[in-house]
Amino acid sequence: MHQLHSLEAALKHFFGYDSFRPEQRQIIEEALAQRDLLVVMPTGGGKSLCFQLPALLKSGLTVVVSPLIALMQDQVDALRDNGIAATFLNSSLSLAEMRSREADILSGKVKLLYVAPERLLSERFLPFLEKVRSQQGISAFAIDEAHCVSEWGHDFRPEYRQLKQLRQRYSHIPIIALTATATTRVRQDIIQQLTLRQPGVHIASFNRPNLYYEVQPKQRQSYNQLLKQIRAQKGSGIVYCLSRRRVNEIAARLAQDGISALPYHAGMSDENRAAHHTCFIRDDVQVMVATIAFGMGINKPDIRFVIHYDLPRNLESYYQESGRAGRDGEPAHCALFFGAKDIRTVEYLIEQKPNPDEQRVARQQLRQVIDYAEGTDCRRTIQLGYFGERFSGNCGNCDNCLNPKPIEDWTIEAQKFLSCVARCQEKFGMAHIIDVLRGSRRKKIEQNGHHLLSTYGIGKDQPTEAWKMLARSLLHQGLVSETTDGYRVLKLNKRSWEILRKQRSVEIAVTKAPATKATGEATPKAVEAEMLFMQLQRLRKQLADAQSVPPYVVFADSSLKLMAQLKPQTLDAFAQISGVGTHKLNQYGEQFVSEIRAFCQEQAPPVPLPSDSQMTTLQLYQQGLSVEEIAQRRSLTPGTIINHLSELIEMRQPVDLNRLVSAQHQKCILKAIQTVGSDSLKTIREHLGESFSYEEIRLVRAWWRREKT
């Protein structure tokens, strides 16, 4: 086992990070203790590190099962750029490359091997694996994208089912299963299918606080709306569309309008798709316009925006697709365009499904997407509730929280609604309950005798939309439940009964407002950091292109941002930046530090030199003369001498302010400047009162201005 004096030291040495993210350390400790693990951690949460670091600290080879060639390639590139011995075996290699890599593995030169499930279990590969086990040892099997094992997962792959053979063949070798999303049902299925033995189960929060979520009403000129949105963004982005035709059309129009964009869908040849994918991850193109065929293989951490031009199929898909933004933990923007026409398109696609059960489930999933889009609650509350995670609301990073709608007490209406659910014996969905409340004459109501209920017609005073808004809010807040088998039946829960017994009140947000994200004015320091960031991005791109790897493999955006803010100008200072490990310091340190140094020299403002007259004043001041004595000696007014001294202070010349203004007065003047600004001496004096002179205000203001630059 590789010995470093602590896990934190190993983390900094190999990956350049100073501390673990929540749960990572415990997972790694359990992995080092040879325990089976199930790790559910959202995209960008640091799943890969949970098996990569133990692989480097244990003896033997860790075998990583990964479903896509592009994904393997990206992960191996990133590991190698950290100086870590990793490789993959897949169909993209020639026979000679394959033999050479196998020889490296058998001689112990490789710590992590990435392989697809089909190859891992093939007749040719199993004897090779047996050789590895006897010659080098296998330290663990890591099953990435483990939800593919489960029929209930959103991306089931039959070949993943065969992985249970690993446990039968290598019963003593620990298995780590990892995925970004898994409902309770999928988690149980993964444990069962892979025969995990008393696994450590780690479920991180599904909350991605760095993502800003918004829903925009889809305008008639929706392409112009999209173009405007993309032009307002910086960095790479994905635009998701429902059909291949729409993908081609949008990509072509964006290209005409000067946005570098490429299409991606299942109707293209493998070569074209691979070429477009490479252009996108290497930052040769800004926008990928895609169907959901552009999915799991995207390992690009610095996607800054994801726009759903059309409705997603379900909330889990939306969470997955929008979650491809901001995997590096930096701020990113997720927008969903929502229009009534799109609902009809999805309904038409659902009708084409041959299986009535599939249709039923798809309709329920569509309703959940519509409820999300029309919901007035915090977007995160709705999303996380879907995965069974309670979120208290007010995330401060979604349209509904940044433009909060007025909150009103709707306890009485909620009691009417829930009472109606109870009187309909918890056998009906939202639409039917609202029809009963509003006294509808629909046949279904009379057939069930619901026109005779005491709740029939008691909600006529509220329009249908208001009742829908209440029902959605009750669902999102967990104040009523709903079945999940494709039939949308409302069920009362413990909280519902508390409302009916007057033990709990209900507050809901009641109006809609256009969503805008508040942005402040950029300070000169922020502008300078942004300029350096862009310069470092260009350097990173040159280095990445020279090695034929994506730019994020060299350094993450978050590391570049820290460099731009902290401006390290020595290798020691550069080594302190998060993301700079030992290998990267040796590989790139000199180039980045010299780039930062050059930038700082260019940006340094030219220091103005004092005039001859100012220099004469400074010399007399340094001899210990007072302002009045200098004025007399030079036949000038005291006011002119004060001006000289103020200007000398701003020029960073050796003028001691404490000799000219008492410490108490300095303190009061600085406080006044912070309150009323520094533009007008008259305003500052009026704020302070007559016991302060214009001369001392001018001198302190000069010192304040010097410190600000």
Image: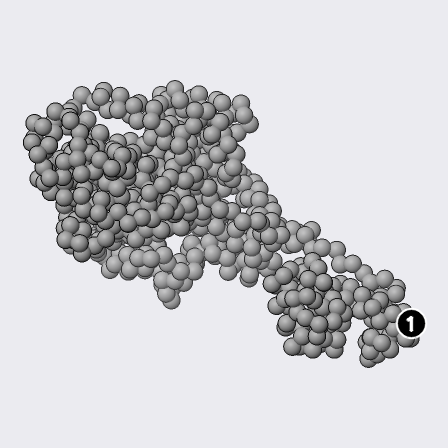
Query: In this image, 185 relative to 95: left or right?
Result: left
Quick check: 569 left or right of 647? Answer: left
Q: Residues within 10 Å of mark 1 (few under 14, many from 20)?
A: some
The quarter of the picture where the N terminus appears is bottom left
Q: Amino acid at mark 1?
A: Arg
Judging depth in this view, the residue of 35 and 375 nearest the camera is: 375
Q: In the rendered image of this protein, does residue 680 appear above or below residue 253?
A: below
Colour option used: one colour
Asked if residue 332 lies left or right of residue 694, the reply is left
Q: Which of the pair 101/6 is nearer the observer? A: 6
Q: Is residue 393 visible?
A: yes
Left-right relation of 79 to 392: right
Residue at the location (42% across, 55% down)?
A: 14
Assign the C terminus to one quadrant of the image.
bottom right
Percent from the top left, x then y, of residue 419? Answer: 14, 44
Q: Is residue 45 above or below residue 625?
A: above
Residue 576 against residue 276 in the figure, above or below: below
Q: Name the element at disc 1.
A: helix
Q: Nearer the viewer, residue 49 or 332?
A: 332
Say which residue appears at 18% left-offset and 51% top-offset.
499
Q: Quadrant of residue 687?
A: bottom right
The x, y position of residue 381, in whole percent, is 30, 47
Identify the residue at horizontal 40%, vertical 22% (top origin).
246
In-front residue for pair 169/344: 344
Q: What residue appears at the point 44 percent right and 43 percent down from the top-left corner? A: 332
The answer, for residue 292, to whether it is visible in the render is: no
Residue 654 lies, in percent from the top left, at: 76, 71
Residue hosting label 1:
634
Q: How many marks?
A: 1
